[in-house]
Image: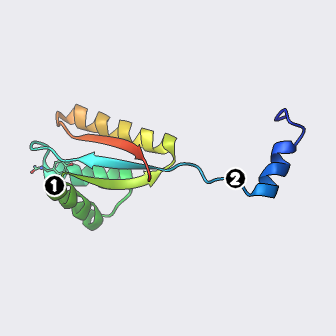
Amino acid sequence: ADGDGGASVVLERLTQKVQPPQMYQVVMLNDDYTPMEFVVFVIQEFFNKDRETATQIMLKIHLDGKGICGVYSRDVAATKVDQVMDAAHKAGHPLQCVSEPVE
Ligand code: TYC
């Protein structure tokens, strides 16, 4: 079915070349306008953090300019970015976030 008569399976077993999928970190960026409370809400809602953890992440972003909200497979990370950007846009806030490959 994979077109090589199973050779790739043999090679993978012989060389241990199967790698885990590339992971992506979702990085949120600071700005001067988005309310702290909204950022805490977003981190709780979309990154499944408790209020205390979400507050710590928000303050780190506020102080350092950016911060990691979570690490996911490529598709899940892209969905998180879309959800955050959509919620921020609908609320009229300029909050930005991006996903980037880990390492
Ligand atoms: N800097 C914002 C303020 O002072 C708060 C903020 C934190 C905004 C984190 C965005 O990703 C962010 N209201």
Name which residue type carries label 2. Val
Q: Is residue 69 left or right of residue 73?
A: left
Residue appearing at x 87%, y 43% in the figure: 6
Q: Quadrant of residue 96?
A: top left
User: Residue 63: x and y, percent?
Assistant: 14, 58
Q: Nearer the viewer, mark 1 or mark 2?
A: 2
Instruction: List the residue tagged with mark 2.
Output: 18
Q: Is residue 77 left or right of residue 59?
A: right
Vertical order, 77 against 1 (above or below): below
Q: Nearer the viewer, residue 21 or 28?
A: 21
Circle 2 sits in a helix, a strand or a loop, which is it? loop
Q: Which mark is residue 62?
A: 1
Vertical order, 13 against 1 (above or below): below
User: Residue 47: x and y, percent?
Assistant: 37, 53
Q: Is residue 87 left or right of residue 32?
A: right
User: Residue 25: x and y, percent?
Assistant: 40, 50
Q: Residues within 10 Å of mark 1 (few under 14, many from 20)?
A: some
Specify whether tag 1 is near ligand 1 (CB below 8 Å).
yes
Please identify the quadrant where the N terminus is shown: top right
User: Residue 10: x and y, percent?
Assistant: 85, 50
Circle 1 sits in a helix, a strand or a loop, which is it? helix
Q: Residue furthest left?
A: 32
Q: Nearer the viewer, residue 55 or 16?
A: 16
Q: Quadrant of residue 32?
A: top left
Name which residue type carries label 1. His
